[in-house]
Image (cartoon, rainbow, N blue to C red):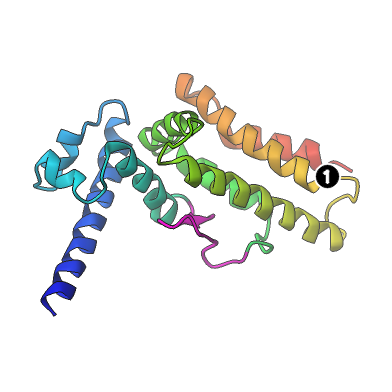
Amino acid sequence: MKARGSYAKGVAKRDEILQTALDVIAQNGYRKTSIRDLAAAVGLSQTGLLHYFGTKEELFAAVLRKRDEIDGGGFLVIDDANEVSFPDRDESDLGDVIEVISRVVKHNAEVPGLVQLYAQFSTEAAESGHPAQAYFQKRYEAFRSAVAGAIRAKQEAKELPASLDADLSATLLAAAIDGLQTQWMLDDSIDMVANVQYLWERLTAA
């Protein structure tokens, strides 16, 4: 019973760290957030903090997963084992595709520090062995699969033109979202939602 209680406390502390990290990074940005800052915010030493994650990179990869879980608009979630789930919907049932995506993009504009973390890690994750590599691979794969599946469902319902290539459209949307986030970080006057919606309108025009 004691071991079980210790495990539960460890899980709770890990969750507290991730929740706190989300708030601190969203406010201060990835570059201005140190392990020392996060440790102090949850009453731990730097060594004590990393005990729950192993390395700084693994900590920030876990932060990204937590962001998807509670702060990413509920589009998709990837757990510690890199298993994908779609809260309140399945992969082929995304309703109005662009409405769901626009809601997530709009929310991202409210948490610039987390967008900065995502952009930085998505680049670094291209390195073999990076702790976030599997997360990003699964995330892109799941996004493309879900959006392409939703497009095909709408095509079958005669709501989108049959000539639209579902897989290419999903890939272009993923690229546009990430590219717009990079531009927006340099110039926050860019309306990411309007640009994504414009691209969707052009892609789906009969």
As for residue 74 lying within the magenta part, the answer is: yes
Crowd band around label 1 with a 10 angstrom C-alpha radius: few (<14), some (14–19), many (20+): some
Would you name the residue on which mark 1 appears?
165
Q: Position of residue 148 (x, y in %)?
A: 73, 51
Residue shown at 63% from the left, 33% from the top = 175
Q: Image quadrant of residue 112?
A: top left
Residue furthest front as drawn: 129
Q: Is residue 110 magenta?
A: no
| Region in magenta | 73-90
Q: Is residue 191 visible?
A: no
The kind of residue on which mark 1 rests is Asp
What type of secondary structure mainly makes up the magenta span? loop
Q: Residue at x 39, y 34 (%)?
A: 117
Residue 27 coordinates in the image, percent (x, y): 29, 35
| Residue situated in front as seen by the camera: 74 or 63 | 63
Q: Is residue 102 left or right of residue 58?
A: right
SS of the residue under disc 1: loop
Q: Image quadrant for the C terminus?
A: top right
Which residue is located at x 90 percent, y 51 percent?
Answer: 162
Classify 131 as above or below 34: below
Nearer to me, 28 or 134:
134
Q: Quadrant of residue 195?
A: top right
Q: Quadrant of the N terminus?
A: bottom left
- On the question of residue 58 being in view, the answer is yes
Question: Where residue 125 sits in the image (x, y, percent)?
Answer: 47, 34
- Is 27 situated above or below 166? above
Find the residue positioned furthest to the bottom.
1
Q: Residue 118 appears in which quarter of the rendering?
A: top left
Foreground: 137 or 107? 137
Q: Is residue 101 left or right of residue 57?
A: right
Question: How many callouts does the rendering have?
Answer: 1
